[in-house]
Image (spheres, helix red, strand yellow):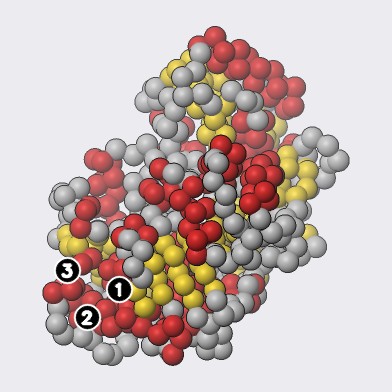
């Protein structure tokens, strides 16, 4: 039986709790969640029929968790729809939702009751998660369902990824080999359940630890992303009050948390953390150092930060740094990266953070026989198929080819960017991530909100949000000139323009990755609000 289906009925389920803090501090026992999921399973089958498909906007609520487990134990295909990406209007979002429901064959959409009015124009009937509570019957069987999650859409239109429960089980089991559960596990997460890192990496990783052979009691503490974004201190406070042993954050969230730690008078206790996983977007060494400097004052253990790399096609995790060793990085020549060569330098260059070794049962290799090349992955946790596509996602011998450029050496995986993020400038290959890093190091730019895109004339343009909410025009023009000089000095190729755009308009995926292709289209079509340029 699948770990996911087994988890709710294990003996330790009666000693384990789920806290959804946006709904108050009253927890639900995991064993009670089991009962609720059986009622929700009967409700889902009534909605969709045997083997039906239901889409959902997953959020951190007890009712949502009951529906998730209901789908997994009732033979239903659950489609996790993304929440709106940054910079996406409601009309575009509803068009995306319509396309995803059509692609997957979803006949109903389930969401938190507070979202129902916003989803009134959805292409299928919309229901609240709590509607199952009016159902008096239960479904006692266990028929494995399946799961569809979407790629982030950082470079292209999101693709639907079909996962079996066996694939998800395999990834969770690999993570248990990386960090074995032990009695008293406390998982604390504000990551959206609509994202694989939030759902599989933390909610399911925590709840399935009640299964043999681990049989650990667990507390799973869930916050909503909007609560964290409104006040990053609520995450640190929850980790303190519940004695969190595992948590996670993308790099942009570490920047927010660093600022909160630096400006607060509150005292937090982060000493119980065994792991703070950092991933879902490129990890900045400077960001890790800045967070460590502040968080160490609040007890953060020296080895707690664990940088990782994952992708939706592998259920979630591919590689994660050891929780028993400090994180590490190397400096490499960015021009060599553009030429698919790996050349470490003592100073300067592009600093790449190690993502650690691949997890157990996950094999990686670099295609093309070069030191830097497109990453290929083989694992029992791979997707079954891309929804709506006939071609197999893997080679005949089971390898998934990705567009991520990587280097694998001494058991450590380094991710250097994407193959479609290499620009040809003046006859040379230049990695866009290296351009972003140099431009983004200027104090006038907002950290994590700078991106280079081709200008259509053989050069590139830098698009950046200003660091100050009320930027001075003269100061920004001076910053633009200094960025141009820095890029010319480093790469021998200056941008055709450095454009500062309105804060909050650089498009990103819900997980925080820059949508470079979409940004390029917005700039090309004149659909960005320019503050100034130079």
The residue nearer to you, when weighing 202 against 360, is 202
- Per the image, the residue denoted by label 1 is 66
Q: Which type of secondary structure does the marked residue at label 1 adopt? A: helix
Q: Quadrant of residue 163?
A: bottom left
Contact check, label 1 and label 2, Cβ < 8 Å = yes
Q: Residues within 10 Å of mark 1 (few under 14, many from 20)?
A: many
Q: Quadrant of the C terminus?
A: top right
Q: Which type of secondary structure does the marked residue at label 2 adopt? A: helix
Contact check, label 3 and label 1, Cβ < 8 Å = no
Image point (45%, 51%), residue name: 234
Furthest residue in direction top, as rendered: 474
Task: Estimate the x, y position of residue 297 in percent, counting from the top left.
Answer: 67, 48
Q: Which type of secondary structure does the marked residue at label 3 adopt? A: helix
Task: Estimate the x, y position of residue 87 in percent, counting from the top left.
Answer: 37, 36
Q: Give the Cα distance between marks 3 and 2.
A: 10 Å
Image point (73%, 39%), residue name: 350
Going from N to C along the chain, the mark reached first, 3 or 2, is 2
In the rendered image, the vertical position of residue 525 relative to residue 371, given as above or below: above
Task: Estimate the x, y position of residue 533 in percent, counting from the top left.
Answer: 52, 15
Going from N to C along the chain, the mark reached first, 1 or 2, is 2
Image point (57%, 27%), residue name: 445
Furthest residue in direction right, as rendered: 346
Q: Quadrant of residue 475?
A: top right
Task: Estimate the x, y position of residue 385 in percent, counting from the top left.
Answer: 43, 68
Mark identifier at residue 131: 3
Image point (53%, 82%), residue name: 216
Q: Is residue 486 visible?
A: yes
In the rendered image, the vertical position of residue 263 relative to residue 496, given as above or below: below
- Per the image, the residue denoted by label 2 is 39
The residue nearer to you, when weighing 12 against 528, is 12
């Amino acid at each position: 039986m699948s770990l996911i289906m087994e988890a709710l009925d294990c003996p330790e389920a009666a000693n384990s709790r789920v806290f959804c803090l946006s709904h108050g501090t009253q927890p639900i026992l995991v064993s009670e969640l089991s009962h609720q999921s059986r009622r929700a399973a009967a409700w889902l089958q009534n909605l969709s029929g045997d083997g039906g498909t239901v889409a959902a906007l997953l959020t951190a609520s007890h009712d949502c968790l009951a529906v998730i487990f209901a789908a997994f134990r009732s033979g239903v295909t659950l489609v996790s729809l993304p929440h709106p990406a940054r910079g996406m209007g409601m009309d575009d979002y509803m068009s995306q939702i319509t396309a995803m429901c059509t692609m997957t064959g979803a006949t109903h959409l389930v969401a938190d009751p507070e979202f129902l009015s916003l989803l009134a124009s959805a292409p299928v009937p919309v229901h609240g998660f709590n509607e199952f509570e009016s159902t008096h019957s239960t479904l006692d069987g266990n028929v494995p369902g399946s799961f569809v999650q979407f790629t982030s859409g950082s470079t292209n239109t999101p693709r639907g990824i079909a996962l079996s429960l066996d694939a998800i089980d395999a990834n969770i089991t690999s993570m248990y080999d990386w960090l074995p559960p032990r009695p008293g596990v406390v998982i604390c997460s504000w990551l959206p359940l609509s994202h694989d890192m939030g759902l599989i990496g933390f909610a399911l990783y925590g709840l399935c630890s009640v299964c043999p052979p681990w049989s650990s009691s667990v507390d799973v503490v869930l916050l909503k992303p909007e609560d964290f974004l409104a006040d990053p201190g609520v995450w640190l406070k929850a980790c303190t009050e519940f004695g969190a042993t595992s948590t996670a954050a993308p790099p942009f969230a570490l920047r927010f948390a660093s600022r909160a730690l630096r400006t607060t008078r509150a005292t937090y206790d982060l000493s119980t953390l065994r792991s703070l996983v950092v991933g879902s977007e490129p990890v900045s060494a400077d960001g890790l150092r800045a967070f460590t400097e502040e968080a160490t004052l609040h007890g953060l253990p020296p080895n707690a930060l664990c940088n990782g790399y994952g992708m939706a096609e592998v259920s979630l995790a591919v590689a994660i740094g050891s929780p028993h060793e400090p994180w590490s990085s190397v400096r490499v020549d960015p021009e060599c990266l553009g030429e698919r060569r790996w050349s470490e330098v003592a100073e300067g260059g592009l600093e790449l953070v190690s993502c650690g070794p691949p997890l157990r049962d996950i094999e990686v290799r670099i295609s093309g026989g070069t030191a830097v090349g497109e990453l290929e992955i083989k694992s029992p946790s791979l997707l079954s198929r891309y929804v709506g596509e006939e071609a197999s996602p893997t080679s005949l011998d089971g390898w998934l080819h990705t567009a991520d450029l990587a280097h694998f050496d001494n058991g450590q995986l380094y991710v250097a960017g994407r193959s479609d993020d290499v620009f040809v400038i003046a006859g040379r290959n230049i990695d866009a991530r290296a351009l972003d890093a140099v431009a983004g190091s200027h104090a006038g730019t907002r950290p994590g909100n700078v991106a280079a895109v081709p200008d259509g004339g053989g050069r590139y343009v830098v698009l950046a949000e200003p660091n100050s909410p009320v930027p001075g025009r003269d100061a920004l023009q001076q910053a633009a000139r200094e960025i141009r000089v820095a890029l010319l000095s480093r790469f021998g190729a200056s941008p055709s323009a450095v454009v500062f755009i309105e804060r909050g308009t650089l498009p990103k995926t819900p997980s925080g990755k820059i949508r470079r292709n979409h940004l390029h289209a917005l700039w090309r079509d004149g659909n960005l609000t320019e503050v100034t340029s130079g």
